[in-house]
Image (cartoon, rainbow, N blue to C red):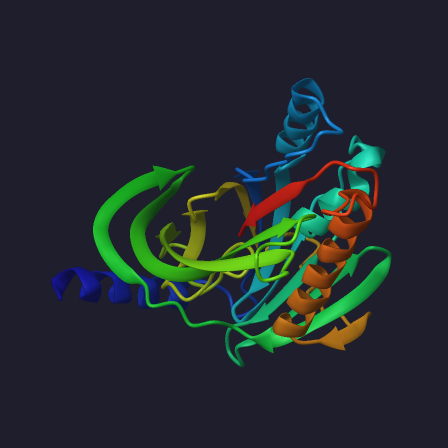
């Protein structure tokens, strides 16, 4: 109780000390471990290794979080050296060119994304995370950060060009993962990278077991201000509707390029497993 009181007191005192128009920009570097497996008689091990190495390289990204006391926009910093040949698959796997808007006051979440040449506007409600605050602390840059953990249920999807015994090309399994976050009450906002939020201070680092997001720079109350706008472009869908559209497209790609038991599509088989 004393620890929680000290955190709350620190948050209140810091809030009183900042300007009414408190805002800023936080830069995050992310590294993702993608579980993507390809089995194909059309592709030798060296080709598979080359593709995986290029994917891993492109999964090391940089993002910016533009925030004020209640709203934020999270988007990738433009990268001019992306491999054009992989632009389609990277947009499919990592959601390249996303704009993710959060309003922690209204719990509104709006994500604008482009998928196979079509723009979508995904509207949903921010998911509440039951964070457990710990006493452990560490320094990230010039900020003192405290540890918080939570459990989250995720869905692992496997897509195969070959049908299983029930005639399906895809399979879903749910798993429970542990989230580990480090937040700083010195920046008194309940925001964080991507869809992470809900702690008494800016989330400076978060690890979901596959992706680590680490804040490398914070600029508070920048001279030119911060422009935060809810994205408006794209076909409006829910998160579940977008997942269904994405899964159907992946299934079509597997059937088209991987072949099946009858030999259509070039004879080999292919299996892609994506854990997110």
Residue 155 seen in the figure: yes
Residue 128: image location, x then y, percent: 42, 72
Q: Residue furthest bottom?
A: 106
Quadrant (top left/top right/bottom left/bottom right) for the N terminus: bottom left
Residue 44 lies, with reference to residue 270, above or below; the image says above
Residue 274: image location, x then y, percent: 58, 48
Residue 55: image location, x then y, percent: 67, 33
Residue in front for this viewpoint, 253 or 276: 253
Q: Residue at x 70, y 39 (%)?
A: 269
Residue in front for this viewpoint, 208 or 173: 173
Residue 9 lies in what quarter of the image?
A: bottom left
Q: Residue furthest top?
A: 46
Q: Horizontal placement of 189 versus 125: left or right? A: left
Q: Horizontal placement of 183 versus 239: left or right? A: left
Residue in front for this viewpoint, 241 or 134: 241
Residue 87 lies, with reference to residue 147, above or below; the image says above
Residue in front for this viewpoint, 224 or 151: 151
Residue 227 lies, with reference to residue 97, above or below; the image says below
Q: Residue furthest left?
A: 2
Q: Residue at x 65, y 65 (%)?
A: 243
Q: Residue at x 72, y 50 (%)?
A: 92
Q: Residue at x 56, y 58 (%)?
A: 171
């Amino acid at each position: 109780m004393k620890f929680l009181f000290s955190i709350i007191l620190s948050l209140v005192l810091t809030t009183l000390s900042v300007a009414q128009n408190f805002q800023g920009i936080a830069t995050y570097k992310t590294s993702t471990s993608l579980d993507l497996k390809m089995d194909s008689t059309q592709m030798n091990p060296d080709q598979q290794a080359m593709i995986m190495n290029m994917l891993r390289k492109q999964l090391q990204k940089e993002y910016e979080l533009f925030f004020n006391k209640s709203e934020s926009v999270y988007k990738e910093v433009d990268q001019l050296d992306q491999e054009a040949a992989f632009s389609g698959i990277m947009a499919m796997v990592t959601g390249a060119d996303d704009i993710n808007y959060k309003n922690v006051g209204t719990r509104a979440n709006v994500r604008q994304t482009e998928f196979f040449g079509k723009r979508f506007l995904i509207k949903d409600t921010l998911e509440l995370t039951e964070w457990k605050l710990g006493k452990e602390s560490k320094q990230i840059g010039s900020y003192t950060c405290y540890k918080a953990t939570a459990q989250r249920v995720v869905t692992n999807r496997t897509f195969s060009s070959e049908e299983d015994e029930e005639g399906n090309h895809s399979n879903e399994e749910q798993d429970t993962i542990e989230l580990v976050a480090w937040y700083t009450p010195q920046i008194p906002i309940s925001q964080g990278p991507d869809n992470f939020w809900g702690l008494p201070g800016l989330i400076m680092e978060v690890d979901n077991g596959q992706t680590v997001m680490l804040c490398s720079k914070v600029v508070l109350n920048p001279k030119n201000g911060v422009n935060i706008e809810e994205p408006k472009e794209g076909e409006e869908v829910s998160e579940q509707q977008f997942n269904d559209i994405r899964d159907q497209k992946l299934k079509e790609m597997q059937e088209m390029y991987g072949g099946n038991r009858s030999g259509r599509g070039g004879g080999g088989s292919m299996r892609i497993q994506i854990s997110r």
